[in-house]
Structure formats: C-alpha cells, structure tokens
Image: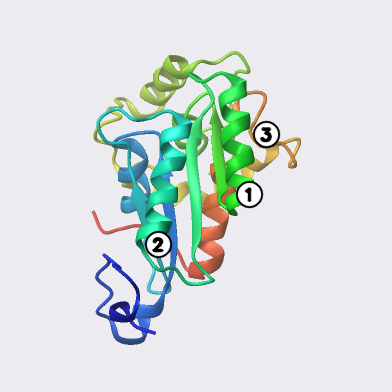
Amino acid sequence: MGITSRKKRPLDRSMGAVRDASLIIIATEGKETEKQYFDGVFQSSKIRVLVLPTIDGDSAPSHVLKRLVQFKKDYQLNGTDQLWLVVDVDRWPVKNLKAVAQSSDQKKFRMAVSNPCFEIWLYLHLSDEVNESWRSKDVEVALRTKLGSYNKSKIQASDFASHLADAIKRASKLDQKETARWPSKTGTHVYRLVKEIRRLGKLSRPANP
C-alpha cells in the first residue's frame, strides 16, 4: 500500500517499495533538541522516524499526549507503525506523569521518559559517569564539559551518532527496574525507543554531515 492510499499521509516516500516503510512517530516535550537528534542520527530505507516537537510552548506531558492523539486521528497508520511520547521528569508532578502514562497504556502508545531531562540520553553517548542528584542544568554542564560547548538549540548529530551502542548499554545498565514507567533516579528510557528504531530499521546509520 503506497502513500496515496493512506489518509492525509504527509511524508515523502517516493522510493518505490521503500514507500511502505514502517513509521515511528515521536511526540516530544522539547522544541528543538529531540528533533535535531532523531532527524540527524537516524536514516534507514526500511523505517522513517517522524518527530512532532512542541510548538508554542505546549510542552506539558498532557499536551505531548494530545499531539500524538491528534496525529493518530489525522493520519492512517499501519499495524507496524509505533507512536511514542518522549518527555522529562524534571518539571512535572508525579501525578501528571502517572495520568499520561495510564492514558498512553490505554491508547497503545509507548513512553520514553528521561530523568531529569532528554540531555541525559545525549550525555550517555559520551560517558557513564552520572550523579543521582543531577538536575537538568547539571546535565547540560556535564555535556558542555565533554563536548567543549553545548547549545540545545543546535546540537551536532555527529557528536552522538557513532556512540549509539555505548548509550544503549549505559542507559540499560541504569534501568534497574524495567517495569517502571520512568526512571526514579538519573537515567532514561529513550534507549528503549532507539532499540525499536534499530530493530525495525535493521540498519541505523548517521546522517551525512
């Protein structure tokens, strides 16, 4: 089934049989960082990763969820397509996260939550030295120390693309309770999403700089 037979499908998949590649749709809390990371790091002829970033400051987990719900209503998806929420722990009450997690479970959406923030996933590409008391600003400082500079509005995919295996291994090691909906200490479940991208795509490779 090609793109024209899918309702309101916005993606350009004019590559013959590749046109029917699986989709992973990711609604994010962030406006720029997550989109730059996923767009820059992952390219595959067998899977497409579509990021729905926050617009107009609507970054609360409940708004991220609504964005994903609306996308599912607007576009006809295949059975192999996956919908994910990528959100952070740092700014939101636990009750808010619980409510979103319950709704996500009901809708068969998946969650990749980071504690304290998405940047911890980026940092784990570079090091396994983490502090359980880190807040978001601490993670950014640690990234800046490793990279020499860090601008969350303009990340370089090349800083991370060749270290995916390390990041997955380190994040998995920190994930001591796999049944938990989000990490209770410093850590991230983004590795679960990345493993799915790699599994469905068979091959993930960095974008050309």
Q: Secondary structure at mark 3?
A: helix
The residue sitting at 46% across, 41% down in the picture is 65
Amino acid type assigned to the residue bearing label 3 in the image: Leu
Camera-nearest residue between 135 and 160: 135
Q: Is residue 199 above or below residue 155?
A: below
The amino acid type of the residue labelled 1 equals Gln
Q: Are the two marked residues, 2 and 1, in contact with CB atoms closer than 8 angstroms?
A: no
Residue located at (56% from left, 65% from top): 199
State which quadrant residue 19 falls in. Answer: bottom left
Q: Is residue 6 above or below residue 30?
A: below
- Quarter of the image for residue 36 reads top left
Report helix, strand or loop for mark 1: helix
- Please give the label number shown on residue 174: 3
Q: Position of residue 98 (x, y in %)?
A: 63, 30
Q: Residues within 10 Å of mark 3 (few under 14, many from 20)?
A: some
Q: Where does label 1 land, which residue?
A: 106
Q: Label 2: which residue?
A: 205
Q: Position of residue 69 (x, y in %)?
A: 44, 49
Q: How is the image coloured?
A: rainbow
Q: Is residue 78 left or right of 20 when viewed as pictured? A: right
First in residue order: circle 3 vs circle 2: 3
